Amino acid sequence: MRAVQRPPEFGPEDPRTPEQRLEDLRRISSQVSKLSSRLSDTVFRTHAVELVRRRRDGRTDVVQFDTIPDSHNEGTLGVVGQLLIRAEAVDDARDLIAAEHLTSSPVRELDDRVVRLTNDQLSGERLAEVARTLRSRGVPVSSHYVTPMGADVKVVVKGFAGPEPSAGPAPRRPRGGKGDPVRVAVIDTGIPKAKRKDGWLDGLARRDNVDPLDDFPQDGTLDIAAGHGNFTTAIVQQVAPGADIEVYKALDSDGFGDEVRVASTMVRAARDGVKKRKRVLINLSIGVETVDDERPVALDVAMEMLGEIEERSGREIKVVAAAGNFGHDRPCWPAAFPGVIAVGALTQQLAPTTWSTRGFWVDCSTIGEGVRSAYVKGRESPEVDPNPDTFGRDAWALWTGTSFTAPQVAGAMARLAQEQGLSLRGAFSRLIAGQPRIPGFGPAVPILPPT
């Protein structure tokens, strides 16, 4: 007879047998080992970034990036040939704008508060030097950063470390509770067009949020970040079955997006939610480290705009973001912005992981190793996994990263706010109340049950 666990406070009943759970634990151990070892392997990381660059070579419809050295001897990614500056500071930078032959264009989606400075002939390193010079004069400017799933240059490493098939069937989708549903906006790779048979993620795909799954190149295999938005959204749905979920596509199926697109999508999601008279929780399973740990300009402006929308509408807006998978304490944006709930990752035993970003700015953490959620149909690329797995139509998988801790917290907040009549801020306070604190990781919060 199959043993069925009793449902925890959050999440559906687990239909796996003890034998299936043991099989999943073995897969999780292998996945975590790969992730941990490759994060410190600079040769592998360089190879992985070059692979991603080659996969998108010549495409004008996707983000093209440069690798930019940073002040910590690591590196970050920036959109080719672009800086971002606050509109009110353009006059203070006229001399360098002219000297470097930069053209200016306002970002309409951010109400012209941000200006792109463009010269496709300049390297990312040179543009970063220009930005650093201007910042030394007090000018708010930065590279136009690439904001990928999880954590910047190492994003491809996370892709190479998973996901893995999960043993056993999908859990039954639970019904939502009573109360006023919270709008949870998931900004990610989007969601596949194909409908599942098991009922998960029904009705969430739209024409403008479809994850193509196979685009780099179209060769019949899954891209590096294929299904990332699907997986993340299903975590929210597991934890908060009554939430009003809206999925937005801001990253491509290799997991890359640019900062302006992410920032403008944040603003769009907030405006969409308040138009529906909803409280809005924005989940961002993305992260970027910057050259000098400076605030990325477009994301900074987006956070200001969210505050203004909240004040005008009288509707709460909160952002929950992945703390990053860098394994150190440098700020990862947008998680490190004041007011954003930054979520780190713990082991299955609620102990600190070696690979999660940590720091005083991390607000809480939950299990981030081997999180189980709904995945997509397809076969992995041999370029990504030398032993590619094949996933069926209603696949469930195991994946590791802070990408999958943030939606647990967003879902838990949405559920507590709905069912207990709390504000979003009150829901977060209730969630972390009485939980043990781990230095650098904040309160350790159990949400989805361990395997």
Image (cartoon, rainbow, N blue to C red):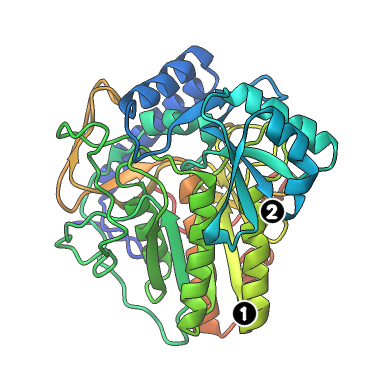
Query: Which image quarter: residue 51?
Result: top left
Toward which corner of the image does residue 292 lie, by quadrant?
Answer: top right
For badge 1, the amino acid type reads Ser
The mark found on residue 47 in the picture is: none
Identify residue for label 2: 87
Amino acid of disc 2: Ala
* Vertical arrangement, residue 13 with respect to residue 56, above or below: below
Q: Which residue is mark 1?
A: 423
Residue depicted at x 72% and y 37%: 293
Residue at left 69%, top 33%?
Answer: 98
State the image quarter where residue 97 is shown: top right
* Left or right, residue 363 beside residue 269: right
In the displayed structure, would residue 143 be above or below residue 2? Answer: above
Instruction: Choose between 55 and 5: the one closer to the eye.
Output: 55
Side of 311 where 139 appears, left or right? right
Residue 274 left/right relative to 428: left
Above/below status of 240 relative to 382: below
- Callout 2: 10 Å neighbours few (<14), some, many (20+)? some
Residue 451 placement (x, y as % from top left):
39, 48
Q: Secondary structure at mark 2?
A: helix
Residue 215 is situated, as x and y percent measured from the top left of the image, at: 24, 38
Q: Nearer the viewer, mark 2 or mark 1?
A: 2
x and y percentages locating residue 358 in the rendered image:
67, 41
Marks 2 and 1, the one that precedes in the sequence: 2
Camera-side residue of 188 and 112: 112
Residue 329 visible in the shown view: no
Horizontal and vertical percent position of residue 141:
71, 42
Quadrant of the drawing holding the N terminus = bottom left
Residue 50 appearing in the image: yes
